[in-house]
């Protein structure tokens, strides 16, 4: 009986830690019950399920492979845009990296950091940040997740949320989409 309890507790602990992003943003709801379509990046490093009705485009070059997607059936300020990118290059997830990202967002993009941190996502080390600002009179938030997948490879998960209505809910829906990410090794 003790072994059974230990096994159940271990499984529960592992499943709770599988997505520290959901914990950071207090996300407990799932994505709407939409028909999904699986997309693979051109360079075959990852695949992800995106709602079939969304407008999705793929891009690649020698050093990166990207998938961009958005629900174009909604108003711009009621939807969000996601970008999933594989990049070739070294990535060191430490305080120096976090400061560099924060400085770039603050000075180049004119965004203010709201929340950031380190954790684990898909059993890989990650750094995330949430920043906010205004562009053309529209408030927006930017969620970035840097996921180190190999010594010289990483994935970025980005969500841009425009407007002021249901912002936290749309950030959580972005994280739910990111949960669909499957690395191809």
Image (tube, rainbow, N blue to C red):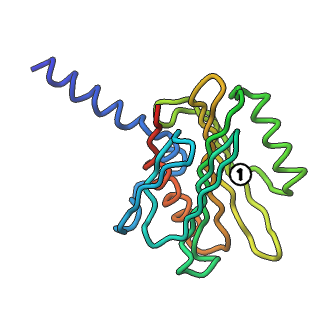
Q: Quadrant of residue 35?
A: bottom left
The residue shown at (83%, 75%) is 136
Which x, y percent locates residue 104?
A: 85, 46
Extreme-right residue of the structure:
107
The residue shown at (43%, 49%) is 180
Along the horizontal axis of the image, is 64 left or right of 56? right
Which x, y percent locates residue 102?
A: 80, 43
Position of residue 98 relative to residue 50, above or below, is: above
Position of residue 139 relative to residue 14, above or below, is: below
Along the horizontal axis of the image, is 89 left or right of 85? right
The N terminus - image quarter: top left
Front residue of this view, candidates 185 and 80: 185
Would you name the residue on which mark 1 appears?
114
Position of residue 169 relative to residue 5, above or below, is: below
Position of residue 171 relative to residue 134, above or below, is: above
- Helix, strand or loop under label 1: strand
Along the horizontal axis of the image, is 125 left or right of 104? left
The residue shown at (79%, 54%) is 112
The residue shown at (64%, 65%) is 161
Which x, y percent locates residue 39?
A: 47, 54
Extreme-top residue of the structure:
3
Along the horizontal axis of the image, is 47 left or right of 92? left
């Amino acid at each position: 009986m003790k072994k059974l309890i230990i096994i159940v507790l271990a499984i529960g602990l592992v499943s709770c830690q599988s997505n520290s992003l959901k914990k950071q943003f207090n996300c407990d709801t799932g994505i709407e019950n939409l028909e999904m379509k699986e997309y693979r990046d051109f360079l075959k490093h990852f695949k992800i399920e995106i709602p079939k009705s969304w407008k999705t485009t793929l891009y690649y070059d020698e050093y990166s492979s990207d998938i961009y997607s958005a629900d174009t059936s909604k108003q711009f300020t009621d939807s969000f845009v996601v970008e999933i990118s594989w990049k070739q290059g070294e990535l060191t997830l430490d305080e120096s990296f976090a400061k560099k990202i924060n400085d770039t967002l603050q000075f180049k993009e004119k965004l203010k950091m709201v929340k950031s941190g380190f954790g684990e996502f898909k059993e890989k080390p990650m750094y995330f940040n949430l920043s906010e600002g205004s562009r053309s009179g529209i408030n927006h938030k930017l969620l970035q997740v840097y996921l180190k997948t190999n010594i010289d490879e990483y994935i970025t998960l980005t969500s841009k949320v425009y407007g002021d209505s249901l912002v936290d809910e749309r950030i959580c829906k972005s994280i739910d989409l990111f949960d669909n990410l499957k690395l191809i090794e």
